[in-house]
Image (cartoon, grey):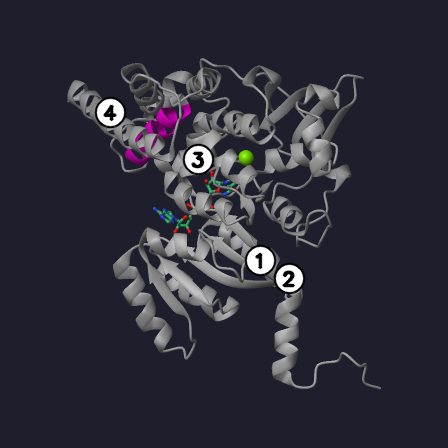
Amino acid sequence: MKSTDAPESANQYRQSESLSQTGIVVFGATGSVGISTLDVVARHPEKFRVVALTAFSQVERMVELCKIHQPEYVVMVDSNAAELLHKALSQTGLSINVLSGPQGLEKVAILPQAEYVMAAIVGAAGLVPTLAAAKAGKRILLANKEALVMSGSIFMNAVRENNAQLLPIDSEHNAIFQCMPALSESEKQANGSLSDLGISRILLTASGGPFRKTALNELDSITPDQACAHPVWSMGRKISVDSATMMNKGLEVIEACWLFETRPEFIQVVIHPQSVIHSMVEYVDGSVLAQLGNPDMRTPIAHALAWPERIESGVDRLNIFDIASLEFEKPDFNRFPCLKLAIEAGEQGGTAPTILNAANEIAVDAFLNGGLSFPGIARVVESTLETMTTTDVDSLETILRVDSEARQVAEESINSIKMRVH
Ligand code: NAD
Ligand code: MG
Protein backbone atom coordinates (compact mmCIF):
# COMPACT_ATOMS: atom_id res chain seq x y z
CA MET A 1 0.00 0.00 0.00
CA LYS A 2 1.20 3.49 -0.86
CA SER A 3 1.36 5.96 2.01
CA THR A 4 -0.26 9.33 1.26
CA ASP A 5 3.03 11.23 1.26
CA ALA A 6 5.05 8.66 -0.73
CA PRO A 7 6.84 10.25 -3.71
CA GLU A 8 5.05 9.76 -7.06
CA SER A 9 8.08 9.73 -9.35
CA ALA A 10 11.85 9.25 -9.26
CA ASN A 11 12.27 12.98 -9.71
CA GLN A 12 9.97 13.76 -6.84
CA TYR A 13 11.78 11.11 -4.80
CA ARG A 14 15.12 12.81 -5.43
CA GLN A 15 13.61 16.17 -4.49
CA SER A 16 12.13 14.91 -1.25
CA GLU A 17 15.38 13.06 -0.49
CA SER A 18 17.44 16.19 -1.04
CA LEU A 19 15.10 18.10 1.30
CA SER A 20 15.89 15.67 4.10
CA GLN A 21 19.64 15.70 3.39
CA THR A 22 21.90 18.35 4.87
CA GLY A 23 23.99 20.13 2.25
CA ILE A 24 27.70 20.32 3.00
CA VAL A 25 30.61 22.29 1.55
CA VAL A 26 34.03 20.72 2.07
CA PHE A 27 36.92 23.21 2.01
CA GLY A 28 40.24 21.41 1.53
CA ALA A 29 38.50 18.32 0.14
CA THR A 30 41.69 16.75 -1.25
CA GLY A 31 43.55 16.94 2.09
CA SER A 32 43.77 14.53 4.95
CA VAL A 33 40.77 15.95 6.90
CA GLY A 34 38.82 16.56 3.67
CA ILE A 35 39.16 12.92 2.58
CA SER A 36 38.19 11.66 6.06
CA THR A 37 35.13 13.94 5.96
CA LEU A 38 34.01 12.60 2.60
CA ASP A 39 34.48 9.06 3.88
CA VAL A 40 32.06 9.72 6.77
CA VAL A 41 29.62 11.62 4.56
CA ALA A 42 29.52 8.76 2.02
CA ARG A 43 28.47 6.37 4.80
CA HIS A 44 25.27 8.41 5.30
CA PRO A 45 23.84 9.31 1.89
CA GLU A 46 20.38 9.64 3.42
CA LYS A 47 21.64 12.38 5.77
CA PHE A 48 24.21 14.37 3.78
CA ARG A 49 24.64 15.74 0.28
CA VAL A 50 27.90 17.25 -0.99
CA VAL A 51 27.16 20.70 -2.42
CA ALA A 52 30.71 21.91 -3.07
CA LEU A 53 34.29 20.68 -2.91
CA THR A 54 37.37 22.89 -2.92
CA ALA A 55 41.13 22.40 -3.24
CA PHE A 56 44.21 24.34 -4.21
CA SER A 57 45.42 22.53 -7.32
CA GLN A 58 45.11 18.72 -7.18
CA VAL A 59 43.16 18.09 -10.39
CA GLU A 60 43.32 14.28 -10.66
CA ARG A 61 42.25 13.72 -7.09
CA MET A 62 39.42 16.22 -7.53
CA VAL A 63 38.14 14.48 -10.67
CA GLU A 64 37.91 11.24 -8.70
CA LEU A 65 36.09 12.99 -5.83
CA CYS A 66 33.65 14.59 -8.29
CA LYS A 67 32.80 11.20 -9.80
CA ILE A 68 32.01 9.79 -6.37
CA HIS A 69 30.30 12.74 -4.68
CA GLN A 70 28.82 14.66 -7.64
CA PRO A 71 28.86 18.14 -6.10
CA GLU A 72 27.12 21.14 -7.69
CA TYR A 73 30.27 23.28 -7.43
CA VAL A 74 34.01 22.73 -7.37
CA VAL A 75 36.56 25.43 -6.59
CA MET A 76 40.19 25.13 -7.60
CA VAL A 77 42.01 28.13 -6.15
CA ASP A 78 44.75 27.88 -8.76
CA SER A 79 43.28 29.15 -12.05
CA ASN A 80 45.32 26.81 -14.31
CA ALA A 81 44.13 23.86 -12.26
CA ALA A 82 40.54 25.13 -12.58
CA GLU A 83 40.89 25.14 -16.38
CA LEU A 84 42.33 21.64 -16.41
CA LEU A 85 39.58 20.41 -14.12
CA HIS A 86 36.91 21.98 -16.30
CA LYS A 87 38.31 20.11 -19.33
CA ALA A 88 38.61 16.83 -17.45
CA LEU A 89 35.06 17.06 -16.09
CA SER A 90 33.60 17.83 -19.53
CA GLN A 91 34.81 14.38 -20.61
CA THR A 92 32.97 12.67 -17.76
CA GLY A 93 29.49 13.95 -18.65
CA LEU A 94 29.09 15.39 -15.14
CA SER A 95 27.55 18.84 -14.99
CA ILE A 96 29.47 20.68 -12.26
CA ASN A 97 30.19 24.42 -11.96
CA VAL A 98 33.93 24.99 -11.74
CA LEU A 99 35.04 28.19 -10.00
CA SER A 100 38.53 29.48 -9.32
CA GLY A 101 40.46 31.81 -7.04
CA PRO A 102 39.81 32.84 -3.44
CA GLN A 103 36.54 34.51 -4.61
CA GLY A 104 35.30 31.04 -5.60
CA LEU A 105 35.83 29.89 -2.02
CA GLU A 106 33.87 32.83 -0.65
CA LYS A 107 31.05 32.16 -3.08
CA VAL A 108 30.55 28.52 -2.07
CA ALA A 109 30.92 29.41 1.63
CA ILE A 110 27.55 31.16 1.54
CA LEU A 111 25.50 28.92 -0.79
CA PRO A 112 21.99 28.71 0.69
CA GLN A 113 21.65 24.99 -0.16
CA ALA A 114 24.53 24.09 2.20
CA GLU A 115 23.95 24.34 5.95
CA TYR A 116 27.32 22.85 6.96
CA VAL A 117 30.83 23.93 6.02
CA MET A 118 33.86 21.76 6.77
CA ALA A 119 36.78 24.20 7.20
CA ALA A 120 39.80 22.01 6.34
CA ILE A 121 42.03 24.31 4.30
CA VAL A 122 45.51 24.39 5.79
CA GLY A 123 46.86 27.69 7.08
CA ALA A 124 45.90 31.36 6.85
CA ALA A 125 44.34 30.87 3.38
CA GLY A 126 41.32 29.38 5.19
CA LEU A 127 40.52 32.51 7.17
CA VAL A 128 38.51 34.64 4.73
CA PRO A 129 36.26 31.85 3.37
CA THR A 130 35.66 30.41 6.87
CA LEU A 131 34.77 33.88 8.11
CA ALA A 132 32.34 34.22 5.18
CA ALA A 133 30.68 30.96 6.29
CA ALA A 134 30.42 32.31 9.86
CA LYS A 135 28.81 35.52 8.60
CA ALA A 136 26.32 33.41 6.63
CA GLY A 137 25.32 31.63 9.88
CA LYS A 138 26.47 28.14 8.87
CA ARG A 139 27.40 25.19 11.08
CA ILE A 140 31.19 25.37 10.82
CA LEU A 141 33.16 22.21 11.43
CA LEU A 142 36.49 23.78 12.28
CA ALA A 143 39.69 21.90 11.48
CA ASN A 144 41.59 24.95 10.21
CA LYS A 145 42.97 26.09 13.58
CA GLU A 146 45.27 28.69 11.98
CA ALA A 147 42.19 30.75 10.97
CA LEU A 148 41.00 30.97 14.57
CA VAL A 149 44.49 31.52 16.02
CA MET A 150 45.24 34.45 13.73
CA SER A 151 41.90 36.23 14.07
CA GLY A 152 40.39 35.02 17.40
CA SER A 153 38.09 37.86 18.49
CA ILE A 154 37.00 38.81 14.94
CA PHE A 155 36.14 35.21 14.12
CA MET A 156 34.29 34.50 17.38
CA ASN A 157 32.30 37.75 17.07
CA ALA A 158 31.24 36.78 13.55
CA VAL A 159 30.07 33.40 14.87
CA ARG A 160 28.09 34.98 17.74
CA GLU A 161 26.59 37.86 15.77
CA ASN A 162 25.34 35.63 12.96
CA ASN A 163 24.16 32.68 15.07
CA ALA A 164 26.63 30.40 13.35
CA GLN A 165 27.48 27.12 15.10
CA LEU A 166 31.13 26.32 15.68
CA LEU A 167 31.98 22.67 16.27
CA PRO A 168 35.60 21.68 16.87
CA ILE A 169 37.13 19.02 14.62
CA ASP A 170 40.62 19.15 16.08
CA SER A 171 40.52 15.87 18.02
CA GLU A 172 41.57 17.46 21.34
CA HIS A 173 39.02 20.27 21.17
CA ASN A 174 36.34 17.88 20.07
CA ALA A 175 37.23 15.72 23.09
CA ILE A 176 37.05 18.72 25.45
CA PHE A 177 33.70 19.70 23.95
CA GLN A 178 32.44 16.15 24.55
CA CYS A 179 33.62 16.25 28.19
CA MET A 180 31.82 19.52 28.95
CA PRO A 181 28.23 19.88 30.10
CA ALA A 182 25.82 20.22 27.16
CA LEU A 183 24.27 23.67 27.54
CA SER A 184 21.45 25.43 25.76
CA GLU A 185 22.14 28.91 24.34
CA SER A 186 20.45 30.60 27.34
CA GLU A 187 22.39 28.45 29.81
CA LYS A 188 25.60 29.39 27.97
CA GLN A 189 24.78 33.09 28.39
CA ALA A 190 24.08 32.59 32.11
CA ASN A 191 27.34 30.65 32.70
CA GLY A 192 30.03 33.10 31.70
CA SER A 193 33.15 31.08 32.37
CA LEU A 194 34.47 27.55 32.78
CA SER A 195 34.69 28.16 36.56
CA ASP A 196 30.92 28.80 36.61
CA LEU A 197 30.54 25.28 35.22
CA GLY A 198 32.65 23.81 38.01
CA ILE A 199 35.59 23.22 35.67
CA SER A 200 39.03 23.71 37.25
CA ARG A 201 41.37 22.84 34.37
CA ILE A 202 41.65 21.59 30.82
CA LEU A 203 44.21 18.86 30.18
CA LEU A 204 45.21 19.11 26.52
CA THR A 205 46.97 15.97 25.36
CA ALA A 206 49.76 15.77 22.78
CA SER A 207 51.55 12.77 21.30
CA GLY A 208 54.93 14.55 21.54
CA GLY A 209 55.62 13.81 17.86
CA PRO A 210 58.48 11.80 16.38
CA PHE A 211 61.34 13.56 18.24
CA ARG A 212 60.21 13.19 21.84
CA LYS A 213 63.30 11.15 22.66
CA THR A 214 65.74 12.23 19.93
CA ALA A 215 69.06 13.59 21.25
CA LEU A 216 68.89 17.40 21.08
CA ASN A 217 72.16 17.61 19.10
CA GLU A 218 70.64 15.43 16.36
CA LEU A 219 67.72 17.81 15.67
CA ASP A 220 69.88 19.94 13.33
CA SER A 221 70.01 17.18 10.74
CA ILE A 222 66.31 16.19 10.78
CA THR A 223 64.88 15.92 7.23
CA PRO A 224 61.34 16.92 6.17
CA ASP A 225 60.40 13.25 5.63
CA GLN A 226 61.55 12.35 9.15
CA ALA A 227 59.54 15.26 10.58
CA CYS A 228 56.43 14.23 8.62
CA ALA A 229 56.57 10.60 9.78
CA HIS A 230 54.23 11.05 12.73
CA PRO A 231 54.20 8.06 15.10
CA VAL A 232 50.40 7.98 15.52
CA TRP A 233 48.45 10.28 13.19
CA SER A 234 48.57 10.41 9.40
CA MET A 235 48.16 14.09 8.46
CA GLY A 236 49.11 16.78 5.93
CA ARG A 237 52.78 17.86 5.86
CA LYS A 238 52.38 21.27 7.50
CA ILE A 239 50.53 19.99 10.60
CA SER A 240 52.93 17.03 10.78
CA VAL A 241 55.89 19.42 11.10
CA ASP A 242 53.90 21.49 13.62
CA SER A 243 53.37 18.31 15.64
CA ALA A 244 57.09 17.54 15.55
CA THR A 245 57.97 21.03 16.88
CA MET A 246 54.87 21.00 19.15
CA MET A 247 53.88 24.35 17.62
CA ASN A 248 50.69 22.45 16.83
CA LYS A 249 49.99 22.06 20.55
CA GLY A 250 50.78 25.74 21.11
CA LEU A 251 48.33 26.72 18.36
CA GLU A 252 45.84 24.37 20.02
CA VAL A 253 46.23 26.13 23.40
CA ILE A 254 45.28 29.40 21.68
CA GLU A 255 42.49 27.66 19.77
CA ALA A 256 41.10 26.24 23.05
CA CYS A 257 41.19 29.69 24.67
CA TRP A 258 38.90 31.06 21.96
CA LEU A 259 36.61 28.06 21.71
CA PHE A 260 36.09 27.65 25.44
CA GLU A 261 36.53 31.28 26.51
CA THR A 262 39.49 30.73 28.79
CA ARG A 263 43.16 31.66 29.24
CA PRO A 264 46.38 29.69 28.70
CA GLU A 265 46.96 29.38 32.49
CA PHE A 266 43.80 27.25 32.67
CA ILE A 267 45.23 24.72 30.22
CA GLN A 268 47.84 22.08 31.05
CA VAL A 269 49.55 20.44 28.07
CA VAL A 270 50.16 16.75 28.75
CA ILE A 271 52.34 14.52 26.58
CA HIS A 272 50.52 11.23 26.10
CA PRO A 273 52.40 9.23 23.44
CA GLN A 274 49.68 6.60 22.82
CA SER A 275 47.12 9.27 21.74
CA VAL A 276 44.22 7.21 23.07
CA ILE A 277 42.95 9.92 25.42
CA HIS A 278 42.22 12.90 23.20
CA SER A 279 41.98 15.40 26.08
CA MET A 280 40.45 15.77 29.54
CA VAL A 281 38.39 18.20 31.60
CA GLU A 282 39.00 18.44 35.35
CA TYR A 283 36.15 19.52 37.66
CA VAL A 284 36.33 21.15 41.12
CA ASP A 285 35.06 17.99 42.82
CA GLY A 286 38.13 16.08 41.62
CA SER A 287 36.43 14.34 38.68
CA VAL A 288 38.41 14.17 35.47
CA LEU A 289 36.41 13.36 32.35
CA ALA A 290 38.31 12.05 29.34
CA GLN A 291 37.32 11.14 25.79
CA LEU A 292 39.07 8.06 24.42
CA GLY A 293 39.14 6.42 21.02
CA ASN A 294 41.41 5.14 18.28
CA PRO A 295 43.37 8.02 16.74
CA ASP A 296 41.26 8.53 13.60
CA MET A 297 39.86 11.91 12.57
CA ARG A 298 36.63 10.30 11.41
CA THR A 299 35.46 10.15 15.06
CA PRO A 300 35.50 13.93 15.71
CA ILE A 301 34.22 14.52 12.16
CA ALA A 302 31.25 12.18 12.65
CA HIS A 303 30.61 13.73 16.06
CA ALA A 304 30.45 17.26 14.65
CA LEU A 305 28.42 16.24 11.60
CA ALA A 306 25.76 14.51 13.69
CA TRP A 307 25.84 16.61 16.89
CA PRO A 308 23.84 16.41 19.12
CA GLU A 309 23.14 12.92 17.78
CA ARG A 310 25.68 10.18 17.00
CA ILE A 311 26.38 8.38 13.74
CA GLU A 312 28.61 5.54 12.61
CA SER A 313 32.06 6.79 11.52
CA GLY A 314 33.82 3.71 10.15
CA VAL A 315 36.40 3.89 12.96
CA ASP A 316 37.37 0.61 14.63
CA ARG A 317 36.16 0.27 18.20
CA LEU A 318 38.87 0.91 20.76
CA ASN A 319 40.02 -2.41 22.13
CA ILE A 320 40.57 -1.53 25.77
CA PHE A 321 42.40 -4.83 26.38
CA ASP A 322 44.95 -3.98 23.67
CA ILE A 323 46.05 -0.79 25.43
CA ALA A 324 48.98 -2.11 27.39
CA SER A 325 49.59 1.14 29.28
CA LEU A 326 48.92 4.84 29.10
CA GLU A 327 51.82 7.22 29.75
CA PHE A 328 51.80 10.91 30.65
CA GLU A 329 54.70 13.41 30.75
CA LYS A 330 55.17 17.13 31.23
CA PRO A 331 56.42 18.86 28.06
CA ASP A 332 60.02 20.11 28.07
CA PHE A 333 60.23 23.67 26.74
CA ASN A 334 63.96 23.21 25.97
CA ARG A 335 63.11 20.48 23.52
CA PHE A 336 59.97 22.20 22.26
CA PRO A 337 60.66 25.99 22.18
CA CYS A 338 57.78 26.51 19.73
CA LEU A 339 55.31 25.37 22.37
CA LYS A 340 56.63 28.00 24.79
CA LEU A 341 56.55 30.74 22.13
CA ALA A 342 52.93 29.93 21.29
CA ILE A 343 51.76 29.86 24.91
CA GLU A 344 53.48 33.22 25.50
CA ALA A 345 51.88 34.70 22.37
CA GLY A 346 48.51 33.42 23.62
CA GLU A 347 49.08 35.09 26.99
CA GLN A 348 50.15 38.33 25.32
CA GLY A 349 47.08 38.40 23.03
CA GLY A 350 46.41 41.16 20.47
CA THR A 351 48.24 40.49 17.21
CA ALA A 352 50.92 38.27 18.83
CA PRO A 353 49.18 35.00 17.75
CA THR A 354 48.75 36.42 14.22
CA ILE A 355 52.50 37.13 14.02
CA LEU A 356 53.36 33.73 15.52
CA ASN A 357 51.15 31.88 13.04
CA ALA A 358 52.40 33.75 9.97
CA ALA A 359 56.07 33.33 10.92
CA ASN A 360 55.50 29.65 11.60
CA GLU A 361 53.83 29.08 8.21
CA ILE A 362 56.79 30.70 6.43
CA ALA A 363 59.36 28.84 8.53
CA VAL A 364 57.68 25.44 8.09
CA ASP A 365 57.42 26.02 4.35
CA ALA A 366 61.15 26.88 4.23
CA PHE A 367 61.98 23.77 6.25
CA LEU A 368 59.87 21.54 3.97
CA ASN A 369 61.65 23.03 0.94
CA GLY A 370 65.13 22.48 2.35
CA GLY A 371 65.79 26.18 3.10
CA LEU A 372 65.83 26.00 6.91
CA SER A 373 66.90 23.49 9.56
CA PHE A 374 64.37 21.95 11.92
CA PRO A 375 65.56 23.99 14.97
CA GLY A 376 65.58 27.04 12.66
CA ILE A 377 61.75 27.05 12.73
CA ALA A 378 61.65 28.17 16.38
CA ARG A 379 64.45 30.71 15.78
CA VAL A 380 62.55 32.35 12.91
CA VAL A 381 59.30 32.49 14.90
CA GLU A 382 61.08 33.95 17.92
CA SER A 383 62.96 36.60 15.97
CA THR A 384 59.79 37.62 14.07
CA LEU A 385 57.92 38.05 17.36
CA GLU A 386 60.84 40.07 18.78
CA THR A 387 61.09 42.31 15.71
CA MET A 388 57.41 43.19 15.41
CA THR A 389 55.37 45.29 17.80
CA THR A 390 52.06 43.77 18.77
CA THR A 391 48.89 45.82 18.69
CA ASP A 392 45.20 45.32 19.50
CA VAL A 393 43.06 43.50 16.97
CA ASP A 394 40.45 45.95 15.69
CA SER A 395 39.52 44.63 12.25
CA LEU A 396 40.07 41.94 9.65
CA GLU A 397 42.18 44.46 7.70
CA THR A 398 44.57 44.76 10.66
CA ILE A 399 44.85 40.96 10.85
CA LEU A 400 45.60 40.62 7.14
CA ARG A 401 48.12 43.49 7.20
CA VAL A 402 49.96 42.09 10.25
CA ASP A 403 49.90 38.60 8.71
CA SER A 404 51.54 39.88 5.54
CA GLU A 405 54.15 41.99 7.41
CA ALA A 406 55.05 39.05 9.65
CA ARG A 407 55.58 36.87 6.57
CA GLN A 408 58.06 39.42 5.20
CA VAL A 409 59.91 39.71 8.50
CA ALA A 410 60.09 35.90 8.75
CA GLU A 411 61.47 35.67 5.18
CA GLU A 412 64.15 38.22 6.11
CA SER A 413 65.02 36.24 9.21
CA ILE A 414 65.40 33.05 7.11
CA ASN A 415 67.66 34.91 4.66
CA SER A 416 69.86 36.21 7.44
CA ILE A 417 70.16 32.70 8.92
CA LYS A 418 71.20 31.41 5.45
CA MET A 419 73.84 34.18 5.12
CA ARG A 420 75.30 33.21 8.50
CA VAL A 421 75.46 29.53 7.52
CA HIS A 422 77.17 30.12 4.13
P1 NAD B 1 46.41 18.81 3.96
O1 NAD B 1 47.67 19.47 3.59
O2 NAD B 1 46.31 17.32 3.89
O3 NAD B 1 45.20 19.42 3.08
C1 NAD B 1 45.05 20.80 2.92
C2 NAD B 1 43.90 21.12 1.98
O4 NAD B 1 43.87 22.55 1.82
C3 NAD B 1 44.07 20.53 0.57
O5 NAD B 1 42.80 20.19 0.06
C4 NAD B 1 44.65 21.70 -0.23
O6 NAD B 1 44.32 21.65 -1.60
C5 NAD B 1 43.97 22.90 0.43
N1 NAD B 1 44.77 24.11 0.32
C6 NAD B 1 46.10 24.25 0.55
N2 NAD B 1 46.49 25.53 0.34
C7 NAD B 1 45.38 26.21 -0.03
C8 NAD B 1 45.13 27.57 -0.38
N3 NAD B 1 46.11 28.49 -0.41
N4 NAD B 1 43.86 27.92 -0.69
C9 NAD B 1 42.87 27.00 -0.68
N5 NAD B 1 43.04 25.71 -0.36
C10 NAD B 1 44.29 25.31 -0.03
O7 NAD B 1 46.06 19.32 5.46
P2 NAD B 1 45.25 18.57 6.60
O8 NAD B 1 46.18 17.71 7.37
O9 NAD B 1 44.00 17.99 6.06
O10 NAD B 1 44.90 19.80 7.55
C11 NAD B 1 43.91 20.74 7.22
C12 NAD B 1 43.63 21.62 8.43
O11 NAD B 1 43.09 20.80 9.46
C13 NAD B 1 44.88 22.28 9.02
O12 NAD B 1 44.55 23.55 9.48
C14 NAD B 1 45.25 21.38 10.18
O13 NAD B 1 45.90 22.08 11.22
C15 NAD B 1 43.86 20.93 10.64
N6 NAD B 1 43.87 19.61 11.33
C16 NAD B 1 44.28 18.50 10.65
C17 NAD B 1 44.28 17.28 11.31
C18 NAD B 1 44.71 16.01 10.60
O14 NAD B 1 44.60 14.92 11.18
N7 NAD B 1 45.17 16.07 9.38
C19 NAD B 1 43.89 17.20 12.65
C20 NAD B 1 43.47 18.37 13.29
C21 NAD B 1 43.45 19.57 12.61
MG1 MG C 1 44.92 18.23 17.27
Residues 117 and 111: in front is: 111
Kindly identify which residue carries mark 4. Answer: 409
Residues 247 and 125: in front is: 125
Q: Is residue 324 above or below residue 387?
A: below
Query: What is the distance, in whole Å, between disc 3 and disc 4 at their CAs?
Result: 19 Å
Report the side of 22 relative to 335 (left or right): right
- Mark positioned earlier in the residue sequence (2 or 4): 2
Report the side of 319 relative to 31 (left or right): right
Whether ligand 1 has any atom under 8 Å from the Cβ at mark 2 is answered as no
Whether ligand 1 has any atom under 8 Å from the Cβ at mark 3 is answered as yes
* Region in magenta: 353-367
Q: Which residue is drawn at 47% across and 64% down?
A: 65
Whole-percent x and y of residue 378? 36, 21
- Which label lies toward us, 2 or 3? 3
Q: Which residue is drawn at 41% across and 67% down?
A: 63
Kindly identify which residue carries mark 1. Answer: 39
Going by the numbered disc 2, the residue's amino acid type is Arg
Dots 2 and 1: beta carbons under 8 Å? yes
